[in-house]
Image: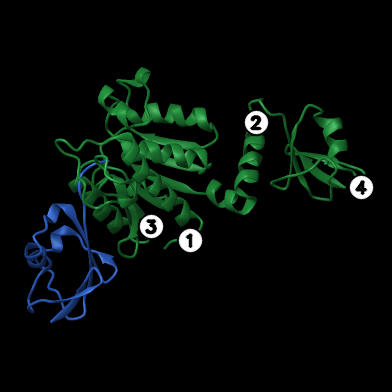
Chain colours: A blue, B green
Amino acid sequence: MLIQVNGKPKEVASGTTIEALLQQLQLNVHQVVVERNTMIVNKQCYADDLLVEGDILEIVHFVGGG
Amino acid sequence: MQVKINEQDITLADGATLEQVRLEVKPDADLLIINGYPAEPGTRLYEGDRIVLIRRGEVPAEEELDALLSARHTPGVHEKIKGACVGIAGVGGLGSAIAVALTRIGVGQLIIADFDTVEASNLNRQHYFIDQIGLPKVYALRDTLARINPHVHITACHLKLTPDNLGELFASTQVLVEAFDRADQKVMLIEAFTSRCPDTPIVAGSGMAGYGPSNSIRTEQCGKRLIVCGDGETAAGPGVGLMAPRVGVAAHHQANAVLRLLLGLES
């Protein structure tokens, strides 16, 4: 199924969770903020929330320093 | 006709000029402001005008400072900034510089929170002074901000921000600034605050270590209510220290993003 990640189309298998997508993208779950269809998703939901066709994700990866 | 001079109600004869008022009320004034804009002495006054007479070199009273900021920023802009409340989570290199910038432009209320104390190693980039070493950062910063503009209302919270306390602490803010050091803490703050205040914009920082090009630091809208400033990749680490110039560039990207949000120029 087709979703959108950071403005670009991406094909993912049905049944993919947010956690699985982050693993595919090799991103550390503790360093990212995921917005799904304009709502920021709480980390506790990553393992359970299934992506659906047409989802629009913004994944923001943070690095340390301030 | 009735006018206000330095916030006092005064009755003047019709046709009075600014120069006549200056000679009568404050002859040594050399900066004359009508309704938020600097004006020439010969300017004719009208019913309801608000006049501020200032002597350069003198510490201004609150209403004089207010009029100066208004004249500098234009009245419509000044009123929006003055009426705003901004939260700053973390007052290290980013947060202390952001707080200074927002105080200088006269943001009415700042809520600053940090658990840390000032250390000598902070002075390469953070807005503290050698005589403040050992003080909680939020109290040291509050004192510094009061020296810039004592009329900005500062709420200083010396505590560790957690998912349980930060929503309540920053609930009244129009914009929240993320200015933490650790990446996982940045993410914690954004997730926890958003679940409590989903409509309040957050301005975060990511990637400002080292001495790479200034122009690789950007301000980007990342989703509906999140703006991120930085190069997105240069983490602090061995050989890549956090230094005043580049941290300052990112901090002022953040401060300007806050200002634009307050003025309704960003979502």
Discs 1/3, front: 1
Mark positioned earlier in the residue sequence (2 or 1): 2
* Front-most of residues B112 and A9: A9
Is circle 2 on the same chain as circle 3?
A: yes
Mark positioned earlier in the residue sequence (3 or 4): 4
Mark positioned earlier in the residue sequence (2 or 4): 4
**Which amino acid type is shown beneath numbered disc 4?**
Gly
**Which amino acid type is shown beneath numbered disc 1?**
Leu
Mark positioned earlier in the residue sequence (1 or 3): 3
Mark 4 nearby-residue class (10 Å; few <14, some 14–19, many ≥20): few
Horizontal side of residue A35 vs B111, given as left or right: left
* Front-most of residues B210 and B117: B210
The answer to the question of whether label 2 and label 3 lie on touching residues, with beta carbons closer than 8 A, is no
Q: Which residue is mark 1?
A: B265
Mark positioned earlier in the residue sequence (2 or 3): 2
CA separation in Å, label 2 and label 3:
34 Å
CA separation in Å, label 3 and label 4:
49 Å
CA separation in Å, label 1 and label 3:
15 Å
Element type at marker 1? loop
Which chain is disc 1 placed on? B
Q: Which mark is residue B15?
A: 4
Element type at marker 4? loop
Q: Which mark is residue A7?
A: none
**Which amino acid type is shown beneath numbered disc 3?**
Thr
Q: Which residue is mark 2?
A: B61
Residue B21 in the image: state x and y as whole percent: 85, 36
Above or below residue B57? Residue B265 is below
Q: Which mark is residue B200?
A: 3
